[in-house]
Amino acid sequence: MTEQAAAPRRTPLSRERVLHAAVALADDGGSESLSMRKLAQELGVVPMALYKHVANKEELLDGMVDVVVGEIDPPVRGADWKPAVRQRILSARRALLRHPWASQVIESRTTPTPAGLAYLNSMIGMFREGGLSVGLTHHVMHAMGSRILGFSQELYVGSPAVDPQVQEAMARELAGRFPYVAEIAMAAAHVEDSVVGSGCDDQFEFEFALDLLLDGIEALHRRGWTPVTARA
């Protein structure tokens, strides 16, 4: 008598499995297209099974942010604060570029996620352990803004991707009305799929601004800068 082959065991559903599946779906179609029903289909379960691990889509998005933040390299121990901060922020940028939907979701969160708080705490610690004062570090975090998490909201001055003849006519009109804007818009080399704007190299612009900030922070630190007491 031939024994019946045992059916393969299904991988148990867990919060980690749910979150990683959601991240993969968002990578394919964006966070807007993600739904609990679609996620359940991907995992081969009924939608109600998901609610044992995430209460709703907002909690799901929080968890997805934590997955992405968890991909950022840990701090480099024993290194000078400036190159260490730079390296870690560029690691954060690589993580955000792997998951293009993540920056928008991070900005939509009303409260920081646990992994997000841990990351910010460690970044603040890198400045403080590097010798920066509490006051300077406070202002540094404001100045760095979203760049500390690997992305930035840029001022758009580029030209839209349109027919070259139409673009040339638009450039002439722009130059007549707003000559300095036109000068900047036409100066950059063309790069496709830029989040800053057509004609801008995202990575170069990000690193340029990051280095500018870090150089300025270092200069203030060397000068022993302290915040000016607010006038009454």
Image (spheres, grey):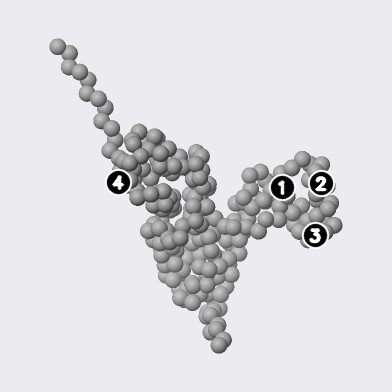
Q: Are marks 2 and 3 in contact (CB under 8 Å)?
A: no
Residue under pointer 3: 178
Please report whichever mark, 1 or 4, sits nearer to the chain's N-terminal start.
4
Q: Residues within 10 Å of mark 4 (few under 14, many from 20)?
A: few
SS at mark 4 in the image: loop
Please report whichever mark, 2 or 1, sits nearer to the chain's N-terminal start.
1
Numbered disc in front, either 2 or 4? 4
> Extreme top residue here?
1
Separation of marks 2 and 4 at Cα, in angstroms: 57 Å
Residue under pointer 1: 160
Please report whichever mark, 4 or 3, sits nearer to the chain's N-terminal start.
4
For the N terminus, give its image quadrant.
Answer: top left
Q: Which of 75 and 231 is in front in this view?
A: 231
Residue type at numbered disc 3: Phe
Q: Where is residue 86 in the image (x, y as percent from the top left)?
A: 51, 59
Separation of marks 3 and 1 at Cα, in angstroms: 16 Å
| Picture residue at 83% right of the left edge, 53% below the top | 173
Q: Do the residues labelled 4 and 3 touch (CB within 8 Å)?
A: no
Residue under pointer 2: 168
Q: Nearer the viewer, residue 86 or 178?
A: 178
Please tell me whether residue 186 is drawn above or below residue 143 in the rendered image: above
How many numbered marks, from 0 up? 4
Whether residue 70 appears in this view of the structure is: no
Label disc, if present, on residue 52 of the rendered structure: 4
Please report whichever mark, 2 or 3, sits nearer to the chain's N-terminal start.
2
Q: Do the residues labelled 3 and 1 touch (CB within 8 Å)?
A: no
Q: Where is residue 118 in the image (x, y as percent from the top left)?
A: 39, 61
Q: Residues within 10 Å of mark 1 (few under 14, many from 20)?
A: few
